[in-house]
Amino acid sequence: MATQLSKQKHDDEVLELEPILTEKEIEIIRMIAEGLSNKEISFKVDYSYGSLETIRNRIYLKLRVRNAPHCVAYALRNGIIS
């Protein structure tokens, strides 16, 4: 199941949706928030280190954030993680 954030819709405006995050991406954000290293996360989700780096970069692009702390702060502010 994917999580989706949306902006308020006004009568004559098109609804703008934030990118959809997969459950796996949200799980990775939670592990980043817990302070796990890339190596630890890749072991827990059973991905290669390179695949994890690709997924992290995709998360950052979807959320329009620059780094792990920015990602965690965004996720907390927007209710993606608690």
Image (cartoon, rainbow, N blue to C red):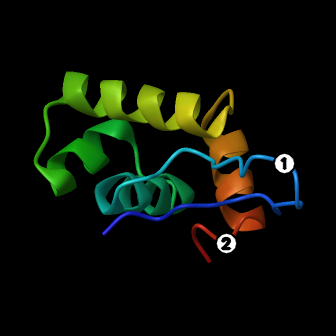
Outermost residue, front direction?
12
Q: CA distance from mark 1 to mark 2?
A: 24 Å
Foreground of the two, 63 or 56 = 63
Residue at disc 1, secondary structure: loop
Residue hosting label 2: 79
Q: Say whether residue 17 is left or right of residue 51.
A: right
The amino acid on which the numbered mark 1 sits, given as a three-letter code, is: Glu
SS under mark 2: loop
Instruction: Name the amino acid, label 2.
Output: Gly
Residue 47 position, x and y percent, is 14, 40
Nearest-to-viewer mark from 1 and 2: 1
Identified at 88% across, 61% down, the residue is 11
Q: Which residue is mark 1?
A: 13
Q: Residue at x 87, y 51 (%)?
A: 12
Q: Is residue 53 left or right of residue 65?
A: left
Q: Badge 2, how many Cα within 10 Å: few under 14, some, many 20+?
A: few
Can you name the residue that lies furthest to the bottom here? 82
Q: Is residue 77 above or below residue 69?
A: below
Mark 1 vs 2, N-terminal side: 1
Q: Quadrant of residue 61?
A: top right
Q: Image point 28% across, 34% down: which residue?
A: 52
Relative to residue 70, is residue 80 depicted above or below? below
